[in-house]
């Protein structure tokens, strides 16, 4: 079973029932990765989740709710640390591949932890960068079976 790094947007959509199709796909994806044990998170992704779900005039979650979710996620899914080597690799990735720094940091986390796949909505589906593939599990035709 190949490991998968789960990007922030998948976690956020799993808390937005008003997004209908994306909500359903995100929940299905998380449930599948939990059941198979192949999902991975990073400290960066958990921090982005808290920020994304608690900001603005109509936040999706309260700070307490977001922190409760982070606690549950961290208990259920292995969380990778952000190290100085990841920061340096992310800088190299941003320079070489034209990614934003924080997207490059997610890529670098996967690359340096030998995780071949990132589930995200933020990149072109099936794009591959130095051995790491970006896949969008929110697409209607996406098949989760290979991650069982």
Image: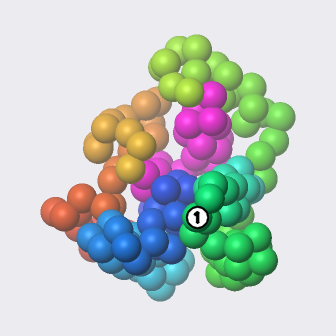
Identify the residue at the far left of this view.
141
Colour basis:
rainbow
2 in magenta: no
The reply to whether residue 131 is visible in this rendering is: yes
* Residue at figure coordinates x 45%, y 72% from the top left: 16
Picture layout, residue 70 above or below residue 111: below
Frontmost residue, 61 versus 106? 61
Picture layout, residue 135 above or below residue 14: above
109 in magenta: yes
Expressed as whole percent of the image width and height from the top left, the position of residue 130 reads 46, 30
The reply to whether residue 148 is visible in this rendering is: no
Picture layout, residue 57 above or below residue 31: above
Q: What span is colored magenta in the figure?
A: 101-120
Which type of secondary structure does the marked residue at label 1 adopt? loop
* Residue at figure coordinates x 31%, y 61% from the top left: 138
Q: Quadrant of the N terminus?
A: bottom left
Reading the image, the residue beneath label 1 is: 58
Expressed as whole percent of the image width and height from the top left, the position of residue 101 reads 63, 28
| Mark 1 closeness class: few <14, some 14–19, many ≥20 residues within 10 Å | few
């Amino acid at each position: 079973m190949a490991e998968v790094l789960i990007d922030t947007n998948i976690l956020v959509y799993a808390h937005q029932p008003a997004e209908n199709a994306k909500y359903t796909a995100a929940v299905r994806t998380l449930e599948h990765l939990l059941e198979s044990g192949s999902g991975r998170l990073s400290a960066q992704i958990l921090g982005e989740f808290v920020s994304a779900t608690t900001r603005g005039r109509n936040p999706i979650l309260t700070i307490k709710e977001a922190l409760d979710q982070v606690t549950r996620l961290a208990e259920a899914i292995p969380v990778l640390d952000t190290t100085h080597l990841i920061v340096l690799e992310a800088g190299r990735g941003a320079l070489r591949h034209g990614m934003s720094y924080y997207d490059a940091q997610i890529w670098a986390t996967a690359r340096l932890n030998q995780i071949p796949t990132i589930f995200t909505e933020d990149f072109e589906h099936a794009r591959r960068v130095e051995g790491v593939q970006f896949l969008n599990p929110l697409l209607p035709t996406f098949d989760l079976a290979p991650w069982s």
